[in-house]
Amino acid sequence: MQVFEALHGSSCPVAIVTGASSGIGRETALLLGRRGYCVGLLARRLERLEQVAEEVIAAGGAAAPLPTDVASRVQVNRAVEAIVRRWGRVDLLVNNAGFGVYGLVSECEPADFERQVQVNYLGAVYCTLAALPTMLQQESGCIINVSSISGKVPSPLSAGYCASKSALGAFSAALRMELRGRGVSVVTVCPGYSEGEFDEAMVKRRPLERRNLLRPVAAASVARTIVRAAERPRRELVTPSALRLLALGYHVMPGLIDWWQSKFRNGPGEARGDSDG
Ligand SMILES: NC(=O)c1ccc[n+]([C@@H]2O[C@H](COP(=O)([O-])OP(=O)(O)OC[C@H]3O[C@@H](n4cnc5c(N)ncnc54)[C@H](OP(=O)(O)O)[C@@H]3O)[C@@H](O)[C@H]2O)c1
């Protein structure tokens, strides 16, 4: 931290984590706290954020709980301004807030599609627009967009979710190219099915039936991938790494993966199946 102070004139690196009230976001905030970060915690549930803030402080960091709906540009701007006013910089933005809707396209409401785009995609865009000027002024920073394997390999019963995560992946890739040479890196992290409250929070248009290939990975393990990516930025990280094979398979033989997903993950005759989160 002394080296950081000497280089940047501020006592700790500053991170913003969205969706910090549970699961992957909470674990990421705790890990950043252990590394001495000042962490702005964004999500809607204030009591949860206050608990996480206490844990971040106990772990050795500083924390500011900022109740925010990332789908609101006004709320996002207010939260990011508060962080910059308080700590003077932004070194890391983790766009992690997200949720899913489970059901066939024909079972979902138009609002299901709209809300997934507003939270999963536009929420990340709003946070990026709010934090980027500070990063560009510093000529340093890292933006991590938490997409999903579903953003790379679409699956049945989660079309709106897959589309929102796919949009986030494309935004991330284009932004990375624009920022090359400006000191700000952009990383896309694509987790597979992970532990957390994702299934509870999911809007279910039919009873949830999980048929995942792999056991869920711990949210703490995804958080370690995120923090490693912040320390040594890469283009994209798929976790667990076994899912890279699925992504590669879809790239090379999309028709075969489509067939396999609709046959074994959708069920013959009737649509059954799941999403990898
Ligand atoms: N779990 C999986 O299997 C899995 C797999 C791949 C990718 N992912 C992605 O990983 C990210 C984290 O998911 P998770 O597994 O940790 O799920 P989670 O435990 O349900 O956490 C989701 C977080 O997002 C926040 N959130 C939801 N809507 C929000 C909104 N409108 N504004 C602000 N915050 C909002 C929630 O907080 P509040 O309710 O307090 O607002 C919560 O903190 C999501 O983007 C998800 O799509 C998850």
Image (spheres, grey):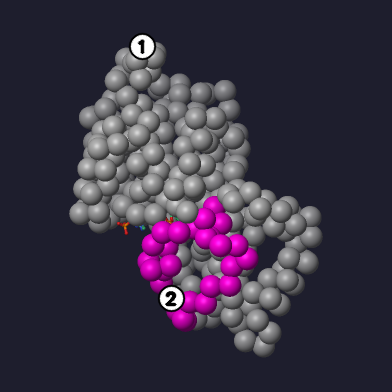
Identify which amino acid the numbered label 2 is placed on.
Lys
Q: Is the residue marked by circle 2 packed among few (<14), some (14-19), or many (20+) residues within 10 Å?
A: some
Q: Are marks 1 and 2 in contact (CB under 8 Å)?
A: no
Note whether 9 is above or below 13 in the view shown: above
Residue at 40% across / 43% down in the picture? 28
Kind of element beneath mark 2: strand
Identify which amino acid the numbered label 1 is placed on.
Ala
Q: Residue 79 lies in what quarter of the image?
A: top left
Residue at image mark 1: 6
Q: Is the residue marked by circle 1 packed among few (<14), some (14-19), or many (20+) residues within 10 Å?
A: few
Main secondary structure found in the magenta portion: loop
Note whether 69 is above or below 211 in the view shown: above
Residue 134: x percent and y percent?
37, 28
Residue 195: x percent and y percent?
45, 59
Residue 228: x percent and y percent?
51, 35
Q: Is mark 1 within 8 Å of ligand 1?
A: no
Of 157 and 26, nearer the camera is: 26
Q: CA distance from mark 1 to mark 2?
A: 51 Å
Q: Is residue 218 left or right of residue 238?
A: left
In the picture as drawn, the residue positioned furthest to the top comes out as 6
Magenta residues (range) = 191-217
**Residue 195 belongs to the span the image colors magenta:** yes
Residue at image mark 2: 204
Kind of element beneath mark 1: helix
Note whether 55 is above or below 240 in the view shown: above
Q: Is residue 134 left or right of residue 51?
A: right
Residue 126: x percent and y percent?
39, 45
